[in-house]
Amino acid sequence: MVHLAESVDLPAYLREGCLNHLSDLGGFTAVVSEELRRGFVRNRVAAPPETSNLFRKVHGGYLMYLVDVTACMAGYTLGKRNVTQQASLNFIRGVEVGDSVAVEARVLHDGSSTALVEVRIVDGNGRLCVTAEVGLFFVGSIDPAALPPEPYFPRNPGVV
């Protein structure tokens, strides 16, 4: 909650414009997986309206989510549980709400404790929108005999 005492020196149009940035993002259940193979993942999403930022483009935080999840999935294909250690994104072109984008992650380095993953987001016209490098830290091996971890919320319906 913004305290008025902290924002009284701002004109109302600036204060309201700033506060309008604080909107609920959605669209996380719209992502589907198209391809899974060792060291490579391709996910796709038609960005729904609830992914919009204040300027009616897909929110950069949503694009970061796509990068993070897809990179971690690529690390998981190696048989290793992982968490994101570092991410560097380059936002090259805005993504239109409603556009179908492909998110591809390719493992560039598979080390004993870390991996480096390259991620690209390409729009429906084949234009590069986001490039990223994600450093993963391995927190353990995946036991083939164990059940996969259950998501906290139900899994997206999109399957390969």
Image (cartoon, rainbow, N blue to C red):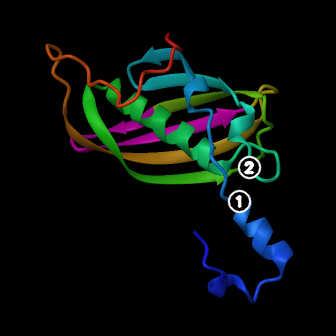
Percent across and percent down for residue 56 are 82, 45
Q: Nearer the viewer, residue 31 or 139?
A: 31
Q: What is the number of the mark on residue 53?
A: 2
Q: Residue at x 49, y 24 (%)?
A: 41
In the displayed structure, 30 sits above or below 3; it is above
- Of the image marks 1 and 2, the number of the one nearer the N terminus: 1
Secondary structure mostly seen in magenta is strand
Q: Residue at x 83, y 82 (%)?
A: 11
Residue bounds of the magenta highlight = 107-122
- Residue 114 lies left or right of residue 32; in this view the side is left
Percent across and percent down for residue 114 are 29, 45
Mark 2 nearby-residue class (10 Å; few <14, some 14–19, many ≥20): many
Q: CA distance from mark 1 to mark 2?
A: 7 Å
| Residue 118 is covered by the magenta coloring | yes
Q: Are marks 1 and 2 in contact (CB under 8 Å)?
A: yes
In the displayed structure, 10 sits above or below 51; it is below
Q: Residue at x 43, y 21 (%)?
A: 155
Q: Quarter of the image holding residue 25?
A: top right
Quadrant position of the N terminus in the picture: bottom right
Residue bearing the label numbered 1? 21
Percent across and percent down for residue 47 are 71, 31
Q: Amino acid at mark 1?
A: His
Percent across and percent down for residue 145 are 14, 13
SS class, disc 2: loop
Q: Quarter of the image holding residue 124?
A: top right
SS class, disc 1: loop
